Image (tube, grey):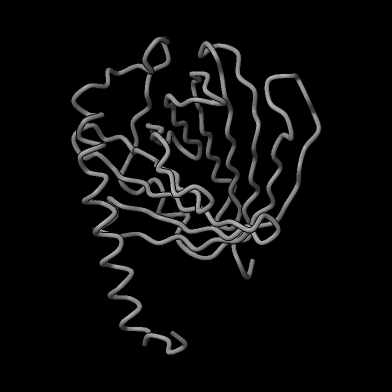
Amino acid sequence: MSTSASPSRRRLLADALAGAAALSLAPLAGAAARSATATLPGTDIALPTGDVHDFDFFVGDWTFRNRRLKQRWIGSQDWDEFPASLRCESRMGGIVNLDEGVFPTKGWQGMTVRVFNLQEKRWYLYWINSSTGQLFPPVAGGFDGDRGEFYGDDTDDGRPIKVRFRWTRVDADHARWEQAFSLDGKAWETNWTMEHTRVGA
């Protein structure tokens, strides 16, 4: 359909989608709250806690430069570099934070939905890739000052792995994200980084 919605209607639609996302993810975060211990399962890594305002700094429009390893687990330093952009918004009084990114040279989009568990004081971060439509398992954690760490379990090519996200608030207009995988929770390989710059900075 070629007719575009009015700004107010688009806002109502965005609010409805955010609310639906929070409701659909609430059982997942609730299950994690009931079953998770204070450490990443199978390791002695403490899951950090944070504050509901941890991701307020990220609200707005950003461009970012990606560096992603072409091959993992072989000690490679051969990186694929590509551009992207995103818009981040806060919902439900700040307990939901979401962004949608466009990767024009890759032909796909990605969305992160972040849900703050008020009882745990811990964020759960969920990633969705448009090329699969799959909701990836969450990583959990929070910020201490300008640095945030988040941990979780996943699989890579069918092999169980540990996942770590690191966020760094560089300043008001710059931020850095890193993803690392580990087989044992001790030795980590960083395989994807993003350098964010606020639009207009």
Point out the image quarter for the C terminus. bottom right
Which picture quadrant has residue 51?
top left
Report the label total: 0
Residue 21, percent from left and from top: 29, 54
Residue 121, percent from left and from top: 26, 35
Determine the residue positioned at 51% across, 28% down.
164
Determine the residue positioned at 36% across, 14% down.
41
Q: Is residue 53 left or right of residue 118?
A: right
Point out the image quarter for the N terminus. bottom left
The residue sitting at the right extreme is 78
Determine the residue positioned at 54% across, 51% down.
131
Determine the residue positioned at 22% across, 29% down.
33
Residue 10, percent from left and from top: 35, 78
Q: Is residue 32 left or right of residue 187?
A: left
Q: Is residue 149 left or right of residue 20?
A: right
| Pick the front one: 82 or 134 | 134
| Pick the front one: 48 or 165 | 165
